[in-house]
């Protein structure tokens, strides 16, 4: 009986078992889902960036009163305050976008590694 378990330990690593293959495939599916999610997040952040840029132009060109929404209330504000608020939001948006793009790149690299592992296993299976 002891000999049988020793023989199992001597299996070559080049031929992964079904559990290892399943684990790799599951991880690939998880990474693919995370890629879809982060891609949608990047799209939303780019839309917010465009909206903030448009708002900055509009407020910059405004000659009359400036109003902004705070919660569910719209209040009058100074042009400089509105521009400062927009600039702060743009900086935060840019930071989030940079972080999301890095996550996307990292996930894309991991997806490529997993795809190569799966491709390497497929002819053996």
Image (spheres, grey):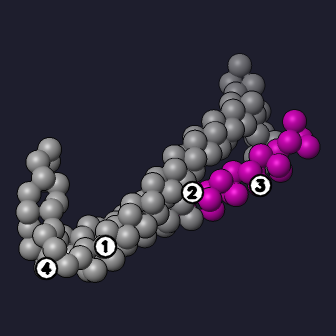
Q: Disc 3 to disc 2, how far (Cα)? A: 14 Å
Q: CA distance from mark 1 to mark 2?
A: 37 Å
Q: Secondary structure at mark 1?
A: helix
| Residue 61 position in % (x across, y down) | 28, 80
In the image, residue 5 above or below residue 37: above
- Dot 4 crowding, Cα within 10 Å, few <14, some 14–19, many 20+: few
Quadrant of the image for the C terminus?
Answer: top right
* CA neighbours of label 1 inside 10 A, class few (<14), some (14 to 19), many (20+): few
Q: Secondary structure at mark 2?
A: helix
Tell me which residue sits at (15%, 62%) in the image. 67
The x, y position of residue 3, in whole percent, is: 74, 27
Q: Is residue 97 visible?
A: no
Contact, mark 1 vs mark 4 (Cβ under 8 Å): no
Residue closest to the far front: 64
Q: Quadrant of residue 89?
A: bottom left
Q: Which mark is residue 107?
A: 2
Give the residue number, with chain letter if any, for mark 4.
Answer: 80
Residue with the most extreme top position: 1
What range of the chain is rendered magenta? 106-125
Dot 2 and dot 4 residues touching (CB under 8 Å): no
- Residue 57 seen in render: yes
Total residue callouts: 4
Badge 3 or badge 4: first in the primary sequence:
4
């Amino acid at each position: 009986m002891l000999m049988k378990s020793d023989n199992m330990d001597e299996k070559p690593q080049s031929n992964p078992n079904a559990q290892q293959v399943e684990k790799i495939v599951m991880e690939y599916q998880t990474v693919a889902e995370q890629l879809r999610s982060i891609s949608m997040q990047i799209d939303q952040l780019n839309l917010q960036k465009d909206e903030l840029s448009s708002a900055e132009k509009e407020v910059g060109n405004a000659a009359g009163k400036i109003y902004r929404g705070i919660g569910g209330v719209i209040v009058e504000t100074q042009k400089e305050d509105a521009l400062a608020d927009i600039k702060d939001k743009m900086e935060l948006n840019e930071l989030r976008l940079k972080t999301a793009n890095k996550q996307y790149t990292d996930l894309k690299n991991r997806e490529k590694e997993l795809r190569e592992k799966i491709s390497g296993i497929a002819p053996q299976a």
